[in-house]
Amino acid sequence: MKEFDQAKIEQAVTMILEAIGEDPSREGLVDTPKRVAKMYQEVFQGLNQDPKEHFATIFGEDHEELVLVKDIPFYSMCEHHLVPFFGKAHIGYIPKGGKVTGLSKLARAVEAVTRRPQLQERITSTVADSLVETLNPHGVIVVVEAEHMCMTMRGVKKPGSKTVTSAVRGVFVDDAAARAEVLTFIRS
Ligand SMILES: Nc1nc2c(ncn2[C@@H]2O[C@H](COP(=O)(O)OP(=O)(O)OP(=O)(O)O)[C@@H](O)[C@H]2O)c(=O)[nH]1
Ligand SMILES: [Zn+2]
């Protein structure tokens, strides 16, 4: 378990408020450092989780065809600016050897990976590799689509722009028809 230092975050937030010329002791701000620390504990709680631990729930089921959970909503924090990026993750895999995991575990793995300072590419590949390492399936495909607040409310200011990343493993690498089938389901 990595240490979460609530007092240190409170100090840091107080310093940021002072540095922008605010008065941290005024009524509206007096509890803000505490609130922000509590919020960071929640939005960064994935730092204490390994996505693979969720795939320990394995059912023996003889299904060697596609399993796809799509439209899993997520919120993460861009590691460059510490502002949110958010969107949907779609996870498909083809089980092998009768090893399937609980459907909710796919969404739990997304939570574990997104609730940290992150990059969209790393979220995508970490989820794919975690499935490969635990279930050893025939193939995995992960698609993540997100809007990055660092590109909308600041900087280049392009609201509505979306970033799509994908990670394919196993049979999906060479099988364009299998990839296309998944993309059709994702869009439907
Ligand atoms: N590849 C990748 N880049 C990201 C992600 N989130 C944010 N970024 C980018 O990280 C880059 C950081 O660029 P820098 O030039 O170091 O920082 P900056 O001056 O704040 O950049 P601007 O956003 O262009 O103003 C920006 O281009 C962001 O759009 C992500 O998940 N993946
Ligand atoms: Zn950013």
Image: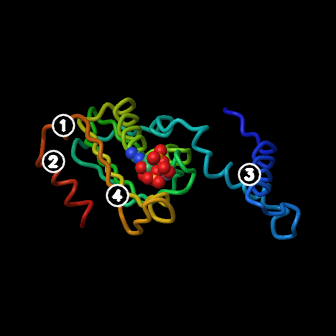
Residue 70 is tagged as: 4
Callout 3: helix, strand or loop?
helix
Q: Earlier in the sequence, mark 4 or mark 3?
A: 3
Amino acid type, label 3: Ala
> What residue sits 22% from the left and 41% below the top?
64
Residue 103 is tagged as: none
Q: Where residue 101 appears, x then y in whole percent? A: 39, 42
Q: Where residue 105 appears, x then y in whole percent? A: 46, 46
On screen, residue 15 above or below 50: below
Seen from the viewer's position, the closer of residues 161 and 42 is 161
Q: Where residue 1 appears, x then y in whole percent? A: 67, 32
Q: Earlier in the sequence, mark 2 or mark 1?
A: 1
**Disc 2 beta carbon < 8 A from ligand 1?**
no
Q: Give the side of residue 172 with respect to residue 13, left or right.
A: left
Q: Give the side of residue 142 with respect to residue 127, left or right.
A: left
Q: Which quadrant of the rendered structure holds the C terminus?
A: bottom left
Residue 178 is tagged as: 2
> What residue sits 12% from the left and 41% below the top?
175
Amino acid type, label 2: Ala
Seen from the viewer's position, the closer of residues 159 and 107 is 159
Seen from the viewer's position, the closer of residues 92 and 168 is 168
> What residue sits 25% from the left and 43% below the top?
63
Callout 4: helix, strand or loop?
strand
Q: Residues within 10 Å of mark 4 (few under 14, many from 20)?
A: many
Amino acid type, label 1: Val
Callout 1: helix, strand or loop?
helix
Are the residues at dot 4 and dot 3 in contact (C-beta closer than 8 Å)?
A: no
